């Protein structure tokens, strides 16, 4: 029997989508139905995943889907015994949205993606399959070269867009969480992320989504060497001192949490357009003691409204995602995080 029952343990559906496609060298997406089956099949000492977090875009979801279709999806998710937690708004160019630091047309596209996500959140809540969770966003400005041309003005553009998005979410009874990831302009270091969060200044409507893999790279100062808290070679004591410094700054804003692993590499295009590389939970090259690091983010989690934690592992080969052992290892790690830091 579990020693703790909260936070609930969720699996993400987007590993079946992110990095997948029909382009050269890409593997095909894994359907929502199959991702649900793989998640439902995982079991560790009788314990299972409690729910899923969900990406609101093709091929899993048409963001303009009818109420009937969205209720069909809700029924499908519920049929596996799952609830829906956090939702990912399709804010990026090429989906529904566009850059949060773009022109007026781009900004309106970004806001329209947030409105769509709020609509779907409301339908899922009315259905009963969703009882908690946030809507995840980022600046949707990939790479930081353009941002660097005028850091102050471009940060202000992102802040202004996020303020409007946060008000939309608030009006719909939702909360937004901005995911800290080094490839997104204005969110590419712990300090720049903090500047945006404080600039918006609406903690009731916009908070931070911490991901163990991505925030590890905050420490190293990738894309923002001036904000590095660690050198490339470090001792365990130096690591945890730096980790505490970072989490003490961002934890008060953290309203959504991703359990993940990172091997210290970056994964992306160009010399600056980089992003954290997720690894399997039991990867021997993983840099993180997942359970220990999670504790820094989950301290006082209840007071910030966190009711579930979610695994995030993007860019895994389909063969890895199809292995039952992959999901059992992830579930086992999630259970250990909950046993150590839950309630």
Image (spheres, rainbow, N blue to C red):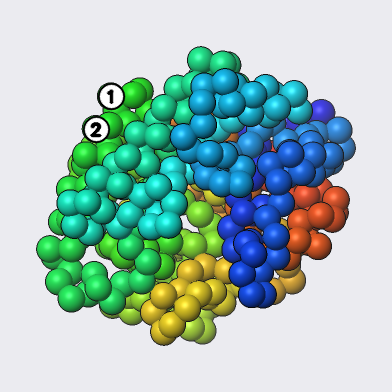
Query: Residues under labels 2 and 1: Cα distance?
Result: 6 Å
Residue 140 visible in the shown view: yes
Residue at numbered disc 1: 171
Q: Nearer the viewer, residue 44 or 132?
A: 132
Q: Nearer the viewer, residue 48 or 22?
A: 22
What label sits on residue 269 in the rendered view? none
Residue at 53% across, 39% down = 62
Q: Is residue 241 above or below residue 15?
A: below
Residue at numbered disc 2: 167
Q: Nearer the viewer, residue 82 or 227?
A: 82
Q: In the rendered image, which quarter contains the N terminus?
A: top right
Tell me the SS state at disc 2: helix
* Residue 317, x across and y down, in percent: 73, 65
Residue at 51% across, 80% down = 234
The answer to whether 160 appears left or right of 217 in the picture is left
Residue at 66% across, 32% down = 51
Residue at 44% across, 43% down = 89
Residue 288 visible in the shown view: no
Q: Are marks 2 and 1 in contact (CB under 8 Å)?
A: yes
* Residue 124, x across and y down, in percent: 53, 23
The answer to whether 27 appears left or right of 172 in the picture is right
Q: Residues within 10 Å of mark 2 (few under 14, many from 20)?
A: some
């Amino acid at each position: 029997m579990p020693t703790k029952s909260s936070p609930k343990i969720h699996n993400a559906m987007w590993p079946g989508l992110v990095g997948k496609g029909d382009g050269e060298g890409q593997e095909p997406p894994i359907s929502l139905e199959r991702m649900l089956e793989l998640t439902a099949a995982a079991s560790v000492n009788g314990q299972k995943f409690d729910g899923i977090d969900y990406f609101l875009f093709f091929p899993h979801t048409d963001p303009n889907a009818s109420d009937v279709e969205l209720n069909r999806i809700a029924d499908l998710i519920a049929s596996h015994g799952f609830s829906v937690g956090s939702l990912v708004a399709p804010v990026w160019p090429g989906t529904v949205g566009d850059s949060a630091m773009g022109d007026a047309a781009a900004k309106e596209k970004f806001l329209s993606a947030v409105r769509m996500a709020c609509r779907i959140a409301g339908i899922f809540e009315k259905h009963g399959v969703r009882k908690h969770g946030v809507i995840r966003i980022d600046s949707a400005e990939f790479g930081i070269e353009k941002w660097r041309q005028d850091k102050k003005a471009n940060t202000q553009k992102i802040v202004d867009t996020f303020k409007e998005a946060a008000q939309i979410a608030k009006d719909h009874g939702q909360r937004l969480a901005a995911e800290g990831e080094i490839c997104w302009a204005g969110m590419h270091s712990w300090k720049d992320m903090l500047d945006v969060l404080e600039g918006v200044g609406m903690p009731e409507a916009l908070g931070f989504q911490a991901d163990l893999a991505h925030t590890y790279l905050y420490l190293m100062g990738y894309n923002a060497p001036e904000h590095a808290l660690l050198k490339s070679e470090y001792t365990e004591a130096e690591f945890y001192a730096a980790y505490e410094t970072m989490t003490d700054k961002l934890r008060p804003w953290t309203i959504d949490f991703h359990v993940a692993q990172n091997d210290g590499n970056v994964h992306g295009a160009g010399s600056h357009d980089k992003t954290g590389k997720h690894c399997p939970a039991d990867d021997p090259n993983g840099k993180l003691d997942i359970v220990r690091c999670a504790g820094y983010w989950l301290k006082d989690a209840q007071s910030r409204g966190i009711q579930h934690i979610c695994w995030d592992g993007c860019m895994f080969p389909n063969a890895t995602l199809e292995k039952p052992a992959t999901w059992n290892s992830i579930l086992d790690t999630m259970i250990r995080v909950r046993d150590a830091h839950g309630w």
